[in-house]
Amino acid sequence: MNAQSLTTTHLYCANSNGTDWNWAQKSNGDYITLIGYWSSLQYGGYWVGYFTINDKQADLLNQCACFTDSCLNYFPHPGNDSNSYWYLIRNADTGQFSGGYYTKFNYKPF
């Protein structure tokens, strides 16, 4: 990953159209934090923002009971607060994106 621009963000989970969501939390109530970097790409005439994590971060998410229990049948999304736009998560090692709802921008958000 691009070490110069690494940052953190929180994780939330949402249904496929973004009408129901909740913050992913550890058993002690702390929010799950991701380490990665923000970027964007053009897709279908719009810009889509995403947060890139590595395989180690992705594995931690998949192994975390708090993520799998609270996000069962939901899609993971990165966000700093409840007013965040809808972004995807990208695995830097595989190039794969998380599914789910995302904001379509008319401008490059990152």
Image (cartoon, rainbow, N blue to C red):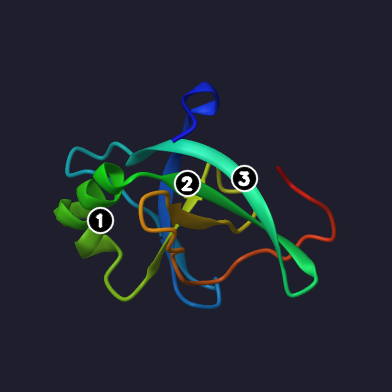
Vertical position of residue 99 compared to residue 37: above or below? below
Marks 1 and 3, the one that precedes in the sequence:
3
In the rendered image, which residue does mark 1 sit on?
67
- Secondary structure of residue under mark 2: strand
Q: Residue at x 70, y 42 (%)?
A: 110
Relative image position of residue 70 (x, y in whole percent) = 27, 62
Q: CA distance from mark 3 to mark 2?
A: 8 Å
In the rendered image, which residue does mark 3 sit on?
39
Q: CA distance from mark 1 to mark 2?
A: 18 Å
Q: Nearer the viewer, mark 1 or mark 2?
A: 2
Pointer 3: residues within 10 angstroms few (<14), some, or many (20+)?
Answer: some
Q: Quadrant of residue 95?
A: bottom left
CB within 8 Å, label 3 to label 2: yes
Q: Residue furthest right?
A: 106
Q: Amino acid at mark 2?
A: Thr
Q: Amino acid at mark 1?
A: Phe
Vertical position of residue 90 compared to residue 25: above or below? below
Closer-to-camera residue (59/70): 59
Q: Amino acid at mark 3?
A: Ser
Pointer 2: residues within 10 angstroms few (<14), some, or many (20+)?
Answer: many
Q: Residue at x 80, y 71 (%)?
A: 45
State the mark number for residue 52.
2
Q: Residue at x 46, y 55 (%)?
A: 90
- Secondary structure of residue under mark 1: helix
Marks 3 and 2, the one that precedes in the sequence:
3
Q: Residue at x 40, y 44 (%)?
A: 53
Closer-to-camera residue (41/104): 41
Closer-to-camera residue (109/32): 109
- Quadrant the N terminus occupies: top left
Relative image position of residue 79 (x, y in whole percent) = 52, 46
**Residue 79 seen:** yes
Q: CA distance from mark 1 to mark 3?
A: 24 Å
